Image (cartoon, rainbow, N blue to C red):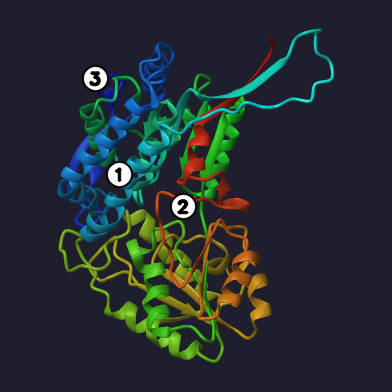
Amino acid sequence: MLIGEQWLDAVSGKTLDAISPATGELLATVPAGEQADVDRAVQAARASFEAGIWRDLPGAQKARVLWKMADLMEAALDELAELETLDQGKPIWIGKYAEIPGGIEQFRYFAGQATKIEGRTIPTSINYQPAGKKIFAYTLKQPIGVVGAIVPWNSPIVLTAMKLAPALAAGCSMVLKPAEDTSLTALRLGELLLEAGLPPGVLNIVTGLGEQAGAALAEHRDVDKIAFTGSTEVGKLIVNAARGNLKKVTIELGGKSPAIVMRDADLELAIPGVANAIFFNSGQVCVAGSRLYVHETIYDKVMAGVADYAQGLKLGNGLDPTVQMGPLISAKHADRVLSYIDSGIQQGAEAVTGGRRVDGTQTFIEPTVLARVNANMSVVQEEIFGPVVVAAPFKDLEDIPAIANDTVYGLGASVWTNSLSAAHRLAAEIRAGSVWINCHPMYDPSLPIGGVKQSGWGRDSGHQAVENYLETKTVCAVI
């Protein structure tokens, strides 16, 4: 783990194994951080913040470091893609052509934001003014302090960049806790940031279990803010832990995102689009299109197309560039996904395709399409986080908002149609942080990402993400 400028073992000497999800091979061992390790990481972050070694640098100097980080990541693209595939299991092309370039662009985008943190002068209407005096009022934007960032295992590089880049642009110091299943890329990013010129102590990385290192970070009284991406269940624990010192919290949580295929949709675009929305990264995506609603007149055609797409996917070790879908993160998670499939079938759902573990494997699940579902089934209401889509027909446009919104989640949704009026009407009526039209999903560092309802608080990405890491101070003077 990284504390200040030192790479250290855990105080306890304990370690965790980094295991390849595809092969079960031992890749490395990493320190199993606990409370004592979080304490020393927070102490290092606090010392760097109070010393002002990063906080007080001009925005242009911060921008140079962030831009240099992007350049270093770009130069190390092949290495980072291979490391993420080894550690997480996804096909290597996802890292190489989508997620790592996405992380690179986060650093470049927020390098630009580092020079645009501005307060305001404010005209006042204060009635009382001393004779011959004037009121001068303005606001300052100042970094919030020490940030604890907790990131998940499904897309570790890009999701880590979504926390690091805006927090560093704002001038904060940070303690990063990567997921215990995917620590290796976070440690490599730490090396690259030091090489880019980030002062020691501004970023500290504690590897370890969520219930130990993550919980200690969320509860820590000297942490000013928690930025978390993960499940809704853990998000609630984070919020509860943060109440001790009323630290600020932004949380991007789970989803059960609907993909809605209208009668007039371009099916050559929609069928592979909605299939990719759920089977990309083996369905281990918070905005995965895990609920598919299709107009009744084209339902059979779309279902056949999605089933054919699923059956045509090549599963295997993500290091093979021809593989289209990799393993789930662990055998334990695969068991969880299978339990949902079995539950759905027991409740009356029909497996149009898939529904089983791939023979001879522990972590590979067939891409699965479940039909004949209803809104009361757990497979429809709960986030499965695997390659499982539930599908149902609908009759009228007026039915869609109620169907789409019948969930505790509100992270994403997509509408597939050639009718702009229908698309924008539904975009307004669906309760979700993002609505995509004829795509699912679409990311850019300039676009805010986050949810409503139990899918989270606040937004990552976009220019307002820097605000997550800033305090507004009002200054009022008689002059």
**Residue 132 place in picture, x, y as percent:** 77, 8
Residue 200 picture quarter: top left
Locate residue 194, reporting x and y percent: 24, 27
Q: Nearer the viewer, mark 3 or mark 2?
A: 2
Q: Is residue 184 visible?
A: yes
Residue 208, x across and y down, in percent: 35, 33
* 325 left or right of 321 in image: right
281 shown above or below 419: above
Quadrant assignment for the C terminus: top right
Check the image and report above or below for 378 versus 240.
below
Dot 1 surroundings within 10 Å: few (below 14), some, or many (20 or more)?
many
Label 3 Cα neighbours within 10 Å, binned few <14 / some 14-19 / many ≥20:
few
The residue beneath circle 2 is 447
**Disc 3 marks which amino acid?**
Gln
Q: Is residue 44 above or below residue 92?
A: above
Residue 182 got which mark? 1
373 left or right of 176 in image? right
Residue extending farthest top: 131
Quadrant assignment for the N terminus: top left
Left or right of 160 in this view: 9: left
Residue type of the residue flagged with mark 2: Leu
Q: How far, Cα to Cα, is label 3 from label 1?
A: 21 Å
Q: Quadrant of residue 115?
A: top left
Task: Locate residue 183 relative to residue 349 in the image: left or right.
Answer: left
Name the secondary structure under disc 1: loop
The residue identified by callout 3 is: 6
Label 2 environment density (alpha carbons within 10 Å; few <14, some 14–19, many ≥20):
some
